[in-house]
Every structure is written in C-alpha cells, then in structure tokens.
Image (spheres, rainbow, N blue to C red):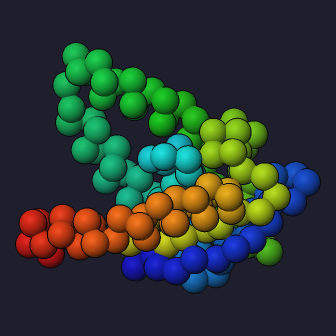
Amino acid sequence: MLIGEYQHSLDAKGRLFIPAKFRDDLGDQFVIARGVGNCLLGMSLEEWNSFSQKLRSQPVTDVQVQKFVRVVFAGATDCEPDKQGRVVIPANLRDIAGLGKDVVVIGVMSRIEIWSKEAWEAYNASANEDYDEMINKMAELGI
C-alpha cells in the first residue's frame, strides 16, 4: 500500500526522485499520467492495466469517457527509474501539473500522486477545512 508524503526537487532535466518505498510497490516499470485536479498519478503496470480494463469496458459512444481516455492515454508515459531512483517527467506532464522545482510525491493507496509544492499545500489546506464534512461522507458510505 502506498502511503506517505515526500518532498523532492525536479532537476534541470525534469527528473524526479521516486522514494524507494514507492518504487518497491510501483515496480521496475510504471506509468505516469494526468491525475484528477492539478497533479499527476503514477501506477504500477498491474494497476494501470486494471484501470485500462475498466475504461475498455465503457461504450465507445460515450463522448465524455472517450474524451477522458484520449487525454489521459495520449499524455501518459512509461517510466523506468534509473539507478538513483529518478524518472523523467515529460514537459507536457510537467506543464499539466504546473510542476516547478519543488515537488511533493504522495502515496494514495494503489497510486502515487505528484504535485507542485504550492498546489499540494493549497489543496491540503482546503481539504483540512472540509475534514468534518469528509468524515460525514465516509459515514454515509459506511466507512
């Protein structure tokens, strides 16, 4: 299970260090793609294939699903960390997430999310303000 928050920096070549704890769960190769909100997501090949199967089962006539599939898959990239545990984040994905030098990598159960430090801090502050509402929603869901 992927959990935790780590702060790192992108280097001049767009490389990001992926924490060893996350690399162990993601495997030797994984996929980075556009996430929900202002972040990127990273999934093991097994999780990516499961996600892909769910999308594949949707009708090709569903315009919103097809828009989503096109945008996410067109921008997705295969990653293989180098010996130092770094992966290259392509410029198109860095732009989508607004990544600059300071980056936060978080574990979210079966995926990682990659955020600009500023976007993560803003999101986290907002989520903390809504924490009681989130607890009520979890209770409604029986969690």
Q: Nearer the viewer, residue 39 or 90?
A: 39
In the image, residue 133 lies at what x, y percent? 25, 66
Front residue of this view, candidates 59 and 68:
68
Which is more toward the observer, 85 or 105?
Answer: 105
The structure residue drawn at horizontal position 49% and vertical position 72%, both measured from the top left corner, is: 107
Question: Residue at 23% of width from left, 21% of height from top?
Answer: 62
**Could you say which is closer to the camera, residue 126 or residue 49?**
126
Where's residue 135, x and y in %? 23, 73
Q: Quadrant of residue 69?
A: top left
Q: Split into 4 quadrants, where in the image is the C terminus? A: bottom left
Above or below 12: residue 6: below
| Number of numbered discs overlaid on the protein picture | 0
Q: Is residue 3 left or right of residue 133?
A: right
- Residue sitting at 39 percent across and 31 percent down? 68
Q: Is residue 42 left or right of residue 86?
A: left
Please state the horizontal and vertical placement of residue 84, each as a whole percent of the image. 80, 75
For residue 84, say whether it is visible: yes
Q: Is residue 118 above or below residue 35?
A: below
Q: For residue 130, what is the image quadrant?
A: bottom left
